[in-house]
Image (cartoon, rainbow, N blue to C red):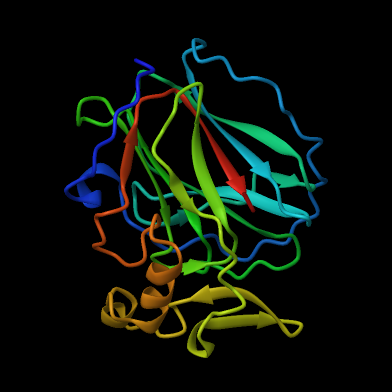
Amino acid sequence: MDQSRIIVTAASCVLLLAACGGAGPVNDEGDDPPVEGVEAALSSTDGVATIQVKNNCNFQIKVGTTAKSNGSVPNPPFATLAPGKSTNHPIGPDNRTYAGIAIYGYRDGANPGGGNMSLAEFGLNTSFHNLDFIDVSLVDAFNLPLRIDGIGVRCPYVGCGLNLLPGCPASGQIRRNGQIISCTKFMNQNPQVVNDPNNPIARYFASKCSSAYAYSGDTTNDRSCNGQDYRVTFCP
């Protein structure tokens, strides 16, 4: 794909991604060993769309994907990353369309459960001029700071680099061992409340991270890029 920078604000994320948000992974605290990190350079000409995931947190995390082309289907974590480590996650041939790819992460031992995580979302090689659309979604919840960058191509800023857990309204706090591990809208399962931009959690997210989706229907934070490979960094 052409490596030039293209910036487009999508008219509707529903047309470009399979969903804006959606439930995340179910609880999964497996014993998979830490990945020894692969900082190997990705080739922008190898024809394989790849998402590199990097852990900049000072604690170990687990990362995985949610497949949302057929609803929100959680997948088990594909890697455990020690601090400073990264892994490459191949998506497939770069000449195909991939809708609704989402990357999640959580602190090892502190999985907040489905629908309670920050998401890095991708729609690759879309029907809209073959562009890739990227966003960071806090539509459901926030649990870790993250951002998306193009590899070998400059993309508009997409991310939420702040830790929103300490200031999370009490109504959205999920706690474990006395610590807040997620700030979620799913404490109230009423879809109208979850998707309401006036929801106090949505207002909190929007006030702190203006470059991330804060509620379903927020079409201001979907950005386009025109690359092959991308990097998701947790705790950027």
Q: Percent from the top left, x then y, of residue 115?
A: 48, 67
Residue pictured at 26% horizontal, 54% vertical: 220
Of residue 177 and residue 9, the one placed in the foreground of this image is 9
Q: Could you say which quadrant of the image residue 181 lies in?
A: bottom right
Q: Is 99 above or below relative to 49?
A: below
Residue pictured at 63% horizontal, 66% vertical: 27
Q: Locate residue 31 relative to residue 15 in the image: left or right.
A: right
Is residue 115 in view from this perspective? no
Q: Could you say which quadrant of the image residue 131 lies in?
A: top left
Residue pictured at 56% horizontal, 79% vertical: 167
Q: Is 148 above or below relative to 145?
A: above
Is residue 27 in view from this perspective? yes
Of residue 44 and residue 27, the one placed in the foreground of this image is 44
Q: Is 38 above or below relative to 10?
A: above
Q: Work out which residue is located at the far left of the displayed protein and give it.
A: 11
Instruction: Say which quadrant the N terminus sits in.
Output: top left
Q: Percent from the top left, x then y, of residue 32?
A: 79, 48
Q: Is 145 above or below relative to 45?
A: below
Of residue 186 and residue 143, the one placed in the foreground of this image is 143
